[in-house]
């Protein structure tokens, strides 16, 4: 199991950008799939972007072309670059990791039970 710690959340105006960071520690060389989830107020968390151990990446349609997930394996950091932010992007953002040697697919966006490790989240607010 890995430990995850997010940072980088802030309040921004529509059209702005943010980069979220997730520091990964613990047993990092275990072939995890890692993802970013967002929980808007009063709603269930939804998966936004994921990256498999082999580098394949998937995005939820609502963020495709605006958000970019990336991973620095040397420093064990997961990033989420968010551009062209909209008010509906507001919420608490979490990074998550699956059980070891798990490969994610698009259905993983809605199967939170696949993700064993979660950070505490970082808050993003987009408003004018």
Image (cartoon, rainbow, N blue to C red):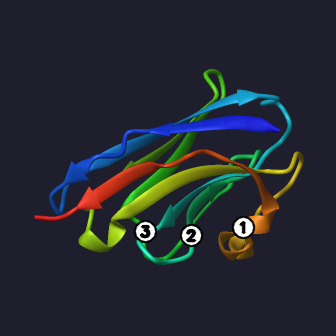
Up/down of 97 relative to 5, above or below: below
Residue in the picture at 76% in, 45% down: 53
Residue in the picture at 86% in, 37% down: 30
Question: Which residue corresponds to mark 3?
Answer: 63
Q: What element does badge 1 sit on?
A: helix
Up/down of 66 relative to 121, above or below: below
Residue in the picture at 78% in, 30% down: 28
> What is the C-alpha distance between the residues marked 3 and 2?
15 Å
Q: What element does badge 3 sit on?
A: loop
N-terminal of the pair, mark 3 or mark 1, is 3
Up/down of 87 relative to 125, above or below: below
Q: Is residue 111 left or right of residue 14?
A: right
Question: Which residue corresponds to mark 2?
Answer: 45
Checking the image for residue 112, the label placed there is 1
Q: Contact, CB < 8 Å: mark 1 with mark 2?
A: yes
Up/down of 123 relative to 88, above or below: above
Q: Residue 112: horizontal and vertical position, in percent?
A: 72, 67
Q: In this view, does 11 lie to the left or right of 101?
A: left
Instruction: Tell which residue pokes out farthest to the front in this image.
Output: 42
For the N terminus, the image quarter is: top right
């Amino acid at each position: 199991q890995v430990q995850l710690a997010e940072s980088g959340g802030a309040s921004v105006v529509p059209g702005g950008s943010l980069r979220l960071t997730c520091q990964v520690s613990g047993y990092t060389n275990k072939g995890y799939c890692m993802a970013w989830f967002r929980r808007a107020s009063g709603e269930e968390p939804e998966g936004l972007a994921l990256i498999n151990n082999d580098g394949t990446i998937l995005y939820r349609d609502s963020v495709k072309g605006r958000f970019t997930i990336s991973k620095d394996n040397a420093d064990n950091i997961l990033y989420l670059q968010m551009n062209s932010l909209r008010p509906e992007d507001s919420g608490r953002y979490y990074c998550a990791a699956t059980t070891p040697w798990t490969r994610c697919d698009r259905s993983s966006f809605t199967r939170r039970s696949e993700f064993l490790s979660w950070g505490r989240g970082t808050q993003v607010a987009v408003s004018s």
